[in-house]
Amino acid sequence: MNRKKRFGIEIVLFLFLYMLASGCSGASAQEEGDGDPLKGMNEIFYGINDVLDKAFLEPVAEIYADHLPAGFQSGISNFFDNLAYPGVIINNILQGKIGNGIKSTGRFIINTIFGIGGLFDPATSLGLERQKEDFGQTLGVWGAGEGAYLVLPAIGPSSVRDTPGVVADIFTNLLYYAESSVMVPLIAVRAVERRADFLEVTRVRDKSLDPYLFTREAYRQRRMDLIYDGEPPYQYDVYEDDEESQ
């Protein structure tokens, strides 16, 4: 078994065992009504992730954002999005969005061929807009509940439902199938590029009264918005009901 396959299996086993432990703990720790029965453990991982981020990733991301020309940043972002786009195609189809599946296939082909491997994005100018679909969203569309909120080491916010999607998304990303000598440095660049996208959000988070709570609720709202394509179902508000009864 080569190193890459073994690495992939290790990721799957780790996330499976983590989810299993989380599920067992969550079943006996529902004293909180906020869907975060593992808050104690989550806060530990959140703290570790935050310390490592501020020590290593955030400073590099700030240099990247401040000094790399915008055109280069756009090209890098386009390139990595294109590598991951087969997952968007698959999930559109799994969610029954056949029309979007056809459009996303067209976008991938056009950007791969005419966008020089995805560095450029001619598909958008042709009306084939970038879509965001992943396996976690697909599970949500299929009716799977969110489950307990999780903070994954080195990855960040997730949930019992979204964590299997993290694994599936790895295997539908073309980057996974590159040689290790190519894959590892590209993963590092991708991490910096993704982190640079969230610099402003991080500044807002750090000014909040409870950064952990801010991150958790922002993640949940974002996932809900993605699952329902920007039109989440109406949330019943007890205060609204009280006002109507007066």
Image (tube, rainbow, N blue to C red):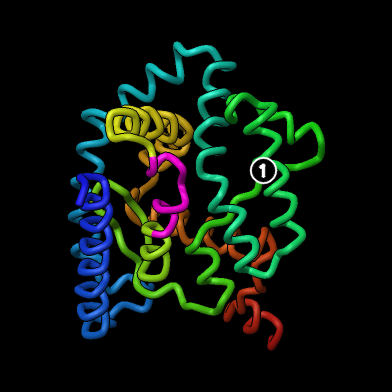
Q: Using residue 54 as the reference point, say whether residue 157 is left or right of it.
A: right
At horizontal 36% and vertical 70% (from top left) the residue drawn is 160
The kind of secondary structure the magenta stretch mainly shows is helix
- Residue 133 drawn at (x, y percent): 58, 55
Is residue 65 depicted above or below 188 in this figure?
above
Question: What amino acid type should be assigned to the residue bearing mark 1?
Answer: Arg
What is the quadrant of residue 36 in the picture? bottom left
- Residue 192 drawn at (x, y percent): 37, 29
Disc 1 target residue? 130
Q: Using residue 15 as the reference point, say whether residue 132 is left or right of it.
A: right
**Pointer 1: residues within 10 angstroms few (<14), some, or many (20+)?**
some
Is residue 98 depicted above or below 144 in this figure?
above
Is residue 80 depicted above or below 147 in this figure?
above
Q: Secondary structure at mark 1?
A: loop
At horizontal 25% and vertical 56% (from top left) the residue drawn is 11
From which residue to which does the magenta span run?
Answer: 168-177
What is the quadrant of residue 61 in the picture? top left
Q: Give 144 or 47, whichever is nearer the viewer.
A: 144
Q: Using residue 118 as the reference point, say whether residue 206 is left or right of it.
A: left
At horizontal 44% and vertical 59% (from top left) the residue drawn is 217
Residue occupying the far right of the picture:
126
70 drawn magenta = no
**Total marks drawn?**
1
Q: Give 207 or 77, whichever is nearer the viewer.
A: 77
In which quadrant will I find the C terminus? bottom right
